[in-house]
Amino acid sequence: MSEQTAKKTPVTYADAGVNISSGDRAKQRIKYLAQKTFNRNVLSEIGGFGGLFRLDGKYQQPVLVSSADGVGTKLKIAFELGIHHTVGADLVNHCVNDIAVQGAKPLFFLDYLATGRLDHEVTEKIVSGLSDACRANGCALIGGETAQMPGFYADGEYDLAGFIVGVVEREKLITGENIHIGDVLIAFPSTGLHTNGYSLARKLFFEVAEYKAGQYINALQDKAGAALMKTHRSYLNLIKKLTAGDYTTGMAHITGGGVTENLPRILPRGMAAQVELGSWPVLPIFEHLRELGNVDQDEMLRTFNMGIGLIAAVPAEKFKRTKSMLDRAGEKFHVIGRIVKGERKVVYV
């Protein structure tokens, strides 16, 4: 070895952009926030190689229901506005809805947060949002991964994804197989775009209209960024009401693909969903997006939820009882159509 080589300064992981000590400090805060969601079924602490969760013995034939998803390009708006506490709720609520429509009760959640350089304040805001949403949905945040990937993500940017597991008694599983011709379709309002369609929405707002995130839009009575950042709604409590009284034969969470592509996922063979356009109020943000890009109606319906976040199929003979229950509970809903004979698609009329 030459004298010049011997005198070289040792290169550390931190020199490559990964500060292990900084990551450890962030994980201590994450541990505290996650523990706030724990219940008696959590058997492990944050920091182990795997999270441990005990399944209650009250289930006779338990079926585990799982789902994974991400926040998507909605994060780009979070970066620009510096709003990081709501994206955690977006992610948790999205995943909760995905399993709840099959009758499942959320058990535990795992998150994946990847960034170029770990920012303690940003990380705490994100995980605080995850923790709060998990607690609100009765779900334990039992683990996850926080990855520092310098050179992979630009400064100030990160990606956020999650994985959820829930449980349902086999006889209570809702798959849509019991949907019948004549069932009434009831839609429940969304709070906005939720977590889908943001690539098109961002293009229309920030490239076509050249809005700034903090710019007030008269048509929306809100700032552009704030309108796009409205939190993805959890329908868990509503779904519990629908399932407890055996009111529904199938439910669809309206996410990417809109009503057009999500509703057919629960339809049995030989059946179609007849949906009446104009039967629900379309939120102003969707009308504004359509006008900005002169977007075709079919494209809008395939890209955005158009103001509908959940659709439930209700047997015609149970509709009056279902309506009474929803009215008493103060749940807003709209009758948007029926199940008809056809081939597993949405027919707009």
Image: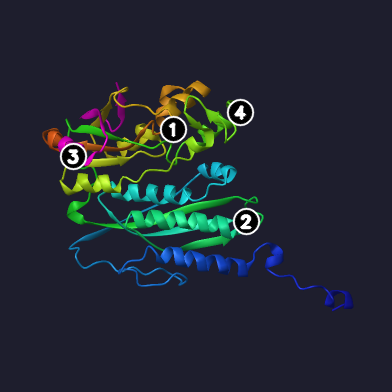
Q: Are marks 3 and 4 in contact (CB under 8 Å)?
A: no
Residue 210 numbered tag:
4
Observer-side mark, 3 or 1, equals 3
Q: Is residue 25 above or below residue 93?
A: below
Q: CA distance from mark 2 to mark 3?
A: 49 Å
Q: CA distance from mark 1 to mark 2?
A: 30 Å
Image quarter of the N terminus: bottom right
Q: CA distance from mark 3 to mark 1?
A: 33 Å
Return the x and y of residue 196 as percentages of the image width and height: 45, 39
Report which residue position mark 3 lands on: 328
192 or 63: which is nearer to us?
192
Asked which secondary structure carries label 3, the reply is: helix
The structure residue drawn at horizontal position 27% and vertical position 53%, both measured from the top left corner, is 104
Report which residue position mark 1 lands on: 303
At label 2, the amino acid type is Gly
> Which segment did they paint magenta?
322-349
The structure residue drawn at horizontal position 55% and vertical position 65%, both measured from the top left corner, is 26
Return the x and y of residue 285 as percentages of the image width and height: 45, 29
Report which residue position mark 2 lands on: 116
Circle 4 residues within 10 Å: few <14, some 14–19, many ≥20: few
63 or 31: which is nearer to us?
31
Return the x and y of residue 299 as percentages of the image width and height: 44, 27
At label 3, the amino acid type is Arg
Observer-side mark, 1 or 4, equals 4
Q: CA distance from mark 3 to mark 4?
A: 44 Å
Image quarter of the C terminus: top left
Q: CA distance from mark 2 to mark 4?
A: 28 Å
State which tag comes first along the sequence, 2 or 4.
2
